[in-house]
Image (spheres, rainbow, N blue to C red):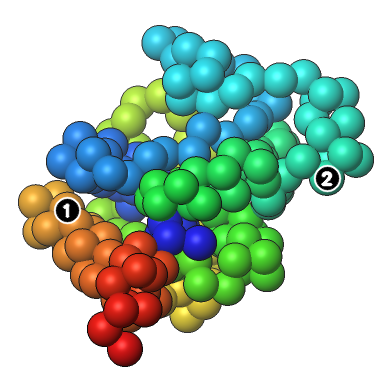
Amino acid sequence: MAGNLYVVAAPSGAGKTTLVRLLLEQEKAVNLSISYTTRAPRPGEENGREYHFVAAEEFRAMIAREEFLEWAEVHGNYYGTSKKWIADQLAVDRDVLLEIDWQGAQQVRQLFPEAIGIFILPPSMEELTRRLTGRGTDAAEVIARRLAAAQAEMRHVGEFDYVIINDRLEQALDDLRAIVRASRLSLGAQRARHAALFARMF
């Protein structure tokens, strides 16, 4: 396997989606894995772009066929990652990024222990509350549930290789790009990518 597999997780409101979008704009070699989900599309979302939207019955059938690298139920909806697509991308030296939760990250590590785990934290609970409230799209009880879920999710930060505190977006993006660039230069990645060179020189 020559490509790197990045697993990025964060509690809701930490800025994960924005950071990943900016990273993909600036690091063209990184490919985003499009997850399958049973939740309804939000305004502006398209099938096959943000997610592959499927019915719950189809999702459960895919689980039975063992088609997912990882899957989880989050806030009453299913989310899952195609096992075959990931393996095919990594085999041809393409970096892949998974934007998933800690449950999915645990499942990924079981099959790909070399996956690079990155957890994004908000600078404080006060700032996280402000961000979730500022969206203006969720009711107060929904925000309360998300804050409680965020605290539970953040307890799993110790399971990841890198931690980015998203206080200033520009700095957080620089940190994320630094992780991606450095991982491409690891001995394992370079040996896989330049196997012929290593064979001639050593």
Side of 84 relative to 88 (left or right): right
Which numbered tag is attached to residue 97? none
Q: Is 58 or 87 nearer to us in this picture? A: 87
Q: Is residue 56 above or below residue 115?
A: above
Q: Which element carries disc 2, helix, strand or loop? A: loop
Question: Mark 1 — residue?
Answer: 173
Q: How many marks?
A: 2
**Lower sequence index among marks 2 and 1:** 2
Residue at x-position 65% and y-position 30%? 37
Q: Is 18 or 32 nearer to us in this picture? A: 32
Q: Quadrant of residue 148?
A: bottom right
Q: Amino acid at mark 1?
A: Leu
Residue 26, how many percent across, how many down?
Answer: 16, 41
Q: Which element carries disc 1, helix, strand or loop? A: helix
Residue 36, how many percent across, how many down?
Answer: 63, 31
Badge 2 density bin: few <14, some 14–19, many ≥20, Cα 10 Å: few
Q: Is residue 139 above or below residue 3?
A: above
- Using the numbered discs, state the Cα–Cα distance from disc 2 to disc 1 in whole angstroms: 35 Å
Residue at x-position 67% and y-position 46%? 83
Q: Is 77 or 115 nearer to us in this picture? A: 115
Residue at x-position 51% and y-position 33%? 34
Q: Is 50 or 143 nearer to us in this picture? A: 50
In front: label 2 or label 1? 2
Q: Is residue 74 above or below residue 194?
A: above
Question: Mark 2 — residue?
Answer: 66
| Residue 22 can be seen in this image | no
Residue at x-position 9% and y-position 51%? 170
Badge 1 density bin: few <14, some 14–19, many ≥20, Cα 10 Å: some
| Residue 85 can be seen in this image | yes
From the image, which quarter does the C terminus lie in? bottom left
Residue 87, how many percent across, how many down?
Answer: 59, 49
